[in-house]
Image (tube, rainbow, N blue to C red):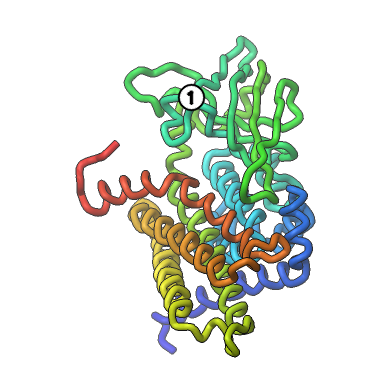
């Protein structure tokens, strides 16, 4: 073996070990009955989250004051979770975003107080950005505001919507407008680390169709006092700082969507091999085979796009943003296709809430609009990849 190929082989072995670690944790903790219970009761599987963290799958290669985790490692974790424990996978996407923001913009005190327990699984965070009147255009529409006080603290007031895990998170990363800047909607917004038990925070759960093992919440902030030392990064530049993490968020969302697609197709294929009709397995029927094959082709295309985008992101994140967008779009399409085919293949059995196909079908729809709508992703790809005029 040449010296030139040895690092690549070692990296591949390391990534395979990450994948095996995730599978070992899932084999130990996840059963169909447990997944169904958390989905039906709309409860978070905190024990599974802690087990994943104990196995080092939140921290991965990252160091508190050093290197960050590989995108390739994160996407492997999230793919496996998407295939078997989707709500936890969506939750980990948020935790990885918090890790990135704290690692990149946090000072030593903030990393020790908030990032270290996140790595260990002793804390969970929630990211509070979107608002009732602002989704894709949230910066321009942002009404949540923070007013500086003479003692250096800030008072935050406003509302946030669709905030995952906010009911029982240990702390929130909140974006609020601190300065009105007419020339640029994305400036004048600051990030704050807000302990969840700070007075003035009220949360209300939202009853959702999918990802029911991770509650979505409305949040109201009423004169929530945050000390100046909990400003994360540079004041008035918080939204720009968040934009720098969107490449990783797109990749991680793509990984969960890809995992859903893979899990749904695997389940459907096993089902059609066993289900009998007219004296033979329904998987023998050509029309059904073609649908499953078409879903499989989309999944394999998404797999290669995701792996390439993650690898390129580890080499040069800025140069891979378009690849990440393409991977996210492909994974979203694969997930909706595979889950639709799976429901058709199973017929009435797909409707049975004790079986996972209907959950895959519901959960996959999240990634048609998160972390950015597929339509906005197409706009981005049209501009950045094809060189077309900006459409928004």
Image location (x, y in percent) of residue 262:
54, 69
- The image quadrant that residue 21 belongs to is bottom right
The residue closer to the viewer here, 239 or 137, is: 137
In the image, taking residue 35 as reference, residue 211 lies left or right, namely: left
- Quick one: quadrant of the N terminus? bottom left
The residue closer to the viewer here, 105 or 351, is: 351
- Quick one: quadrant of the C terminus? top left
Please say if 132 is above or below 146: below
The residue closer to the viewer here, 343 or 193, is: 343
Image location (x, y in percent) of residue 139:
44, 29
Q: Residue at x 39, y 18 (%)?
A: 181
Residue 81 in sight in this render: no
The residue closer to the viewer here, 250 or 15, is: 250
Q: Residue at x 43, y 60 (%)?
A: 333
User: Dot 1 lies on which element?
Assistant: loop
Please say if 293 is above or below 308: below
Q: Residue at x 46, y 63 (%)?
A: 337
- The image quadrant that residue 106 belongs to is top right
- The image quadrant that residue 345 belongs to is bottom right
Please tell me how crowded label 1 is: few (under 14), some (14-19), or many (20+) other residues with Cα within 10 Å. many
In the image, taking residue 330 as reference, residue 43 lies left or right, namely: right
Image location (x, y in percent) of residue 195:
71, 32
Q: Residue at x 48, y 59 (%)?
A: 336
Q: Which residue is mark 1?
A: 142
Residue 235 in sight in this render: yes
């Amino acid at each position: 073996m040449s010296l030139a190929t040895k690092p690549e082989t070692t990296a591949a072995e390391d990534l395979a070990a990450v994948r095996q670690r995730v599978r070992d944790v899932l084999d130990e903790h996840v059963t169909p009955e447990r997944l169904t219970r958390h989905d039906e009761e709309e409860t978070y599987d905190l024990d599974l989250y802690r087990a994943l963290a104990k196995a080092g799958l939140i921290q991965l290669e990252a160091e508190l004051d050093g290197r960050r985790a590989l995108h390739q490692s994160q996407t492997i974790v999230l793919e496996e979770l998407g295939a078997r424990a989707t709500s936890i996978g969506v939750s980990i996407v948020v935790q990885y975003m918090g890790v990135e923001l704290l690692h990149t913009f946090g000072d030593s005190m903030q990393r020790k107080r908030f990032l270290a327990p996140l790595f260990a699984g002793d804390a969970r965070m929630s990211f509070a950005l979107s608002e009732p009147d602002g989704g894709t255009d949230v910066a321009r529409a942002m009404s949540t505001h923070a007013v500086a006080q003479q003692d250096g603290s800030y008072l935050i007031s406003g509302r946030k919507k669709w905030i995952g895990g906010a009911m029982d998170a240990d702390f929130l990363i909140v974006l609020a407008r601190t300065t009105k800047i007419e020339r640029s909607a994305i400036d004048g917004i600051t990030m704050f680390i807000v302990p969840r038990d700070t007075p003035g925070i009220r949360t209300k759960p939202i009853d959702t169709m999918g990802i029911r093992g991770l509650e979505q919440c409305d949040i109201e902030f009423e004169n929530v006092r945050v000390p100046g030392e909990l400003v994360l990064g540079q004041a008035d530049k918080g939204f720009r700082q968040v934009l720098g993490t969107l490449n990783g968020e797109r990749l991680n969302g793509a990984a969960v969507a890809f995992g859903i697609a893979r899990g749904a197709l695997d389940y459907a294929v096993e089902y059609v091999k066993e289900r009998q009709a007219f004296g033979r397995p329904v998987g023998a029927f050509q029309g059904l085979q073609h649908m499953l094959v078409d879903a499989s082709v989309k999944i394999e295309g998404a797999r290669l796009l995701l792996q390439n985008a993650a690898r390129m992101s580890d080499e040069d994140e800025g140069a891979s943003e378009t690849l990440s967008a393409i991977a996210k779009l492909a994974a979203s399409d694969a997930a909706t296709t595979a889950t639709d085919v799976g429901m058709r293949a199973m017929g009435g059995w797909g409707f049975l809430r004790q079986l996972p196909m209907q959950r895959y079908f519901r959960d996959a729809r999240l990634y048609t609009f998160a972390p950015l709508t597929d339509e906005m992703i197409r706009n981005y790809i049209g501009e950045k990849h094809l060189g077309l005029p900006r459409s928004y």
